[in-house]
Amino acid sequence: MARIALVTGGSRGIGAAISKALKAQGCTVVATYAGNDEAAAKFTEETGIKTYKWNVGDYDESKAGIEKVESEVGPIDIVVANAGITRDAPFHKMTPQQWNEVIDTNLTGVFNTVHPIWPGMRERKFGRVIVISSINGQKGQFAQVNYAATKAGDLGIVKSLAQEGARAGITANAICPGYIATEMVMAVPEKVRESIIGQIPAGRLGEPEEIARCVAFLASDDAGFINGSTISANGGQFFV
Ligand code: CAA
């Protein structure tokens, strides 16, 4: 039976590449999105991957959405917590709203996504939890006190879940992408982006597919002994 995979934020950017890579690997994939109906409809039309709309920052919405997916598609074996946002501002200008929006989506959103799926994985004695963190959770980043805090927090979630899930056949791992050519990075002012590319030894931005291939491996049955790890995919920009 094909494994069932849920990818949050899975219809655009890195998430879309992940959804497609898991499908190519033989999984039945479901992607969630928060607001862009048009992009989601186009994604489904192009890939045949079903999309569901909910706000990962809201526990009740996430739980109800996951119950709907599981009743319509089947029990979720693989969850990729990928949905994330930025609200960049230097700390002295950062508002409580910018702080809270990023915490809700990027950190609490991981709890809200994995928590309702976890008991079923424990019962079935199989699960793959993959969280998309960031290089900026490892090194910090000017104007990203909020984002870096969430991405560092995501690593704590994964390392703890790895210990709790191991005996139930569940692994939890993180990927820390560096700067990848997505809308999120293209939204950074061009001059700043050029200076960031100058700091990447590879001399270029990463491609979404380069992250998706890491996810596909961690999601596979072959990766069962990899647990609690962090894969950095950043073109050599930062070593842990
Ligand atoms: N290090 C040190 N100083 C910096 C800096 C940096 N990296 N970036 C900007 N500054 C300085 C500027 O030179 C400027 O200094 P002066 O005032 O002396 O000229 C000052 O900080 C900028 O202040 P502003 O008041 O002009 O800043 P702003 O309110 O307009 O904000 C910004 C601009 C939001 C910081 C913008 O520069 C920006 O978006 N920077 C990029 C932040 C970034 O890398 N975000 C990552 C997004 S991609 C992502 O998050 C995906 C992932 O996981 C990798």
Image: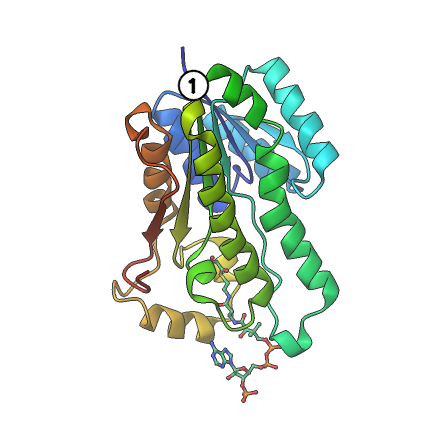
Q: Residue at x 32, y 38 (%)?
A: 213
Determine the secondary structure under disc 1: loop
Q: Residue at x 58, y 26 (%)?
A: 117
Q: Where is 125 relative to 143, above or below?
A: above
Q: Quadrant of residue 199?
A: bottom left
Q: Residue at x 66, y 20 (%)?
A: 68
Q: Quadrant of residue 73?
A: top right
| Extreme-top residue of the structure | 1
Residue identified by numbered label 1 = 3
On the question of residue 226 being in view, the answer is yes
Quadrant of the rendering where the C terminus is positioned? bottom left
Q: Is residue 211 left or right of residue 114?
A: left
Q: Position of residue 123 (x, y in %)?
A: 52, 16
Q: Quadrant of residue 112?
A: top right
Residue type beneath disc 1: Arg
On the question of residue 33 being in view, the answer is no
Camera-side residue: 124 or 76?
A: 124
| Extreme-bottom residue of the structure | 92
Q: Position of residue 2 (x, y in %)?
A: 41, 15
Camera-side residue: 171 or 234?
A: 171
